[in-house]
Amino acid sequence: MKKAIVLFSGGLDSTTCLAIAHAQGFFPLCLAVDYGQRHAIELKAAQHIAASMGAPLHILHCSLREMGGSALTSELPVPMEEAAPGERIPLTYVPARNTIFLALALGFAEAQGANDVFLGVNAVDYSGYPDCRPEFVTAFENLARLATKAGVEGASFHIHTPLAGLSKAQIIHKGLALGVDFSMTHSCYAPSPCGLACGQCESCRLRRRGFLQAGVADPTRYS
């Protein structure tokens, strides 16, 4: 089985990506990043899910708190109001996060002898997060070919974004079809101390709306 690196947060999207990578015949290696996120409880979810799905999990420590500029890596309050689509880039955007994550995944992939990386970006995030757009992913693939020993020697790195054109409801149906247990996943940006989802942040709203539109009971534990 070919190895593939799955950038993994323990959330709804990345867990579905993990299931897809496995279904496509890859041996998935999960890569989670402890970047100083205020919702670090997602790393515990990532550990439990990876273990339940038989995928090795590697956690890299790369704090982005020193940079700040985001409600997820500073003391800025997590926005609870809903912005109109395309109105602005949300305060939950972390500067250069996906660029950094993909760079880490690329290095890990090269070290592991893998040419494939799975990233759970999707259509819902296009209007808000610039590093979720297809043109960003294509540009990074080109960079990977130029910036690595493996690329110079002829290897072709491929960044898989199987959720890119899907809504949250479609992602949920896809995950369920592949046996994903969404009750184990965590998506909230402002969880309670015991890990309950706030139900009000952008991530919670998108998740809850996704289950509603999918016609599936939401297994999330809200505070």
Image (cartoon, rainbow, N blue to C red):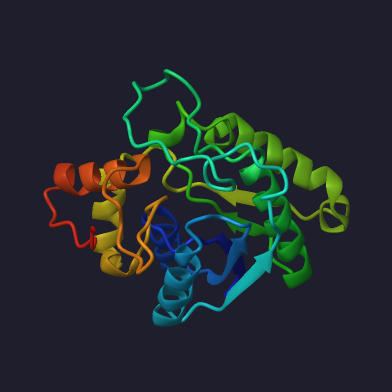
Residue 135, horizontal then vertical, whole percent: 60, 30
Question: Which image quarter: residue 10?
Answer: bottom left
Quadrant of the frame with the C terminus: bottom left
Q: Is residue 171 left or right of residue 217?
A: right
Residue 8 vs residue 175, the one in the foreground: 8
The extreme top residue here reads 87
Residue 75 vs residue 191, the one in the foreground: 75
Q: Is residue 127 left or right of residue 221?
A: right
Instruction: Please name the residue shown 85% across and 47% down the image.
Output: 147
Instruction: Please name the residue shown 71% across and 63% down the image.
Output: 109
Question: Which image quarter: residue 84?
Answer: top left
Residue 87 position (above or below residue 117): above
Residue 175 position (above or below residue 58): above
Quadrant of the frame with the N terminus: bottom right
Number of marks in the rendered image: 0
Instruction: Please name the residue shown 70% across and 48% down the image.
Output: 100
Residue 4, horizontal then vertical, whole percent: 60, 65
Residue 186, horizontal then vertical, whole percent: 37, 61
Residue 221 position (above or below residue 142): below
Residue 192 vs residue 97, the one in the foreground: 192
Instruction: Please name the residue shown 55% across and 62% down the image.
Output: 6
Residue 144, horizontal then vertical, whole percent: 76, 47
